[in-house]
Image (spheres, rainbow, N blue to C red):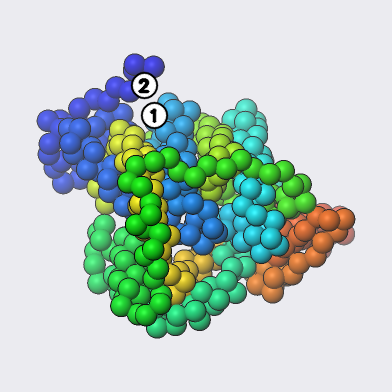
Amino acid sequence: MSNLFTWKLHGDGKTLRPGEVVEPDERLTWTRTAGIGAQHVIAMFGATFLVPILTGFDPSTTLFFTAMSTALFLLINKNVLPSYLGSSFGFIAPITAVTAAHKGLPVASFGILVTGLLLALVGVLVHYAGSKWIDIIMPPVINGAIVAIIGFNLAPSVWTNFKAAPDTALVTLLAVLLVAVLFRGLLGRLNILIGVIIGYAYACFRPGQVDFSEIGKAAWIGFPDFHLPQADFSILPMFIPVVLVLVAENVGHVKSVAQMTGRNYDDQIGTALMADGIGTAIAGFGGGSGTTTYGENIGVMAATKVYSTAAYWCAAGFALLLSLCPKFGAIINTIPAGVLGGVTTLLYGMIGMIGIRIWVENKVNFDKPLNIMVAAITMIIAIGQFAFTIGGISFNGIAIGTIVILVAYHGLKAIGKATGTIEKDDPDIL
């Protein structure tokens, strides 16, 4: 265990020449490493705190479990895979559906818990059986569609918040967009956080948009608001598709880190999935939102060339300290609907576009009827918010869309091969 927390000092620990990188098993001086860790907290914060705000979970509790999940991830992966685990946007739609049905956050926590356990089981399977079967079950046309519908299914909730204060929403959205194109480096990458701050400042000058009453009542130091899950198996069809999204996010993260560091992390895919699954399950058990590896922090690594896992331990420590300040959580809870409407206009659309990017990057051929038909049906089901209940079990657009694309793609592909209309080795049917 002592070797696990030992990093080699990179050079003198103070300077980095152009093109130099700090490897995962290296570190700068602890002061500089802590500074990089603080940047990681800032980078993940803009997206991480929005998930509890949008779903009704306590921001401090969610932040607490992102710190715990990050530490657990680093331990399970033996400090070789640099990653921060923030709040997953994949959970927003099912949590929103559960709370809209007046089932309460403890029921949503049960869905998060089960999702985490299933992801951990997938991780165990991948660790011992390899990851090839993921590509067979979830080729890019399926993978991209499932990720896309997670974002596009949330479009109506965006409009609800946007129209609550259109002026504030517009100011927030414009701020997010302009910061991204006006500034380079880390500042440009923090456009969501900066845009929210600008929108919040504007809302403070608008009558009745921001309520500060709860801030004064909150203590400076205290534990977050934990709660236990409440079992309700009827909501699981809405949460299980998120497992596929988390698999895609984690695999993509591992491959991105491998590309940046020049290391082969294929053996870590299973343990990465296990770690995120266990972290998500623990968060669900204690009242936090589910976690996932964060692209925002890949951006920090790309900008700084510091891949040290020591920086991520510092980030987890900073996040833990922030989570133990109830007053900080109370401030976050004052963010008004207009600000959320503005920032989610971009964020939810970006989730959807990540799915489209998966199609583009993998060169999915939509000239093939099978590919375009299953993708088209799935998108309409999600955007149109199809929903039905069978035997007390609820299915929302994401659950229905996921089931439809998995069954339709593999079923139609099998029929096509059996009848000879689809060649067995057709490279355009991915």
Quadrant in the rendering for residue 156: bottom right
Q: How many marks?
A: 2
Quadrant, the N terminus = top left
Q: In the rendered view, would you say 174 is above or below 285?
A: below
Residue located beneath label 2 in the image: 4
Mark pair 1, 2: CA separation = 7 Å
Picture layout, residue 222 above or below residue 387 = above
> In the rendered image, which quarter is residue 134 located in?
top right
Q: Residue at the location (27% across, 48% down)?
A: 39
Please give the name of the residue rendered at 26% of the width and 57% of the height, measured from the top-left corner.
186
Can you see residue 405? no
**In the orientation shown, which residue stands out farthest toward the bottom?**
167
Graded by Cα atoms within 10 Å as few (under 14), some (14 to 19) or many (20 or more), the crowding at tag 2 reads few
The quadrant of the image that shows the C terminus is: bottom right
47 relative position to 178: left or right:
right
- Looking at the image, residue 417 sits to the left or right of residue 103; the answer is right
Residue under label 1: 79
Q: Helix or strand or loop: what does disc 2 sit on?
A: helix
- Badge 1 marks a residue whose secondary structure is loop
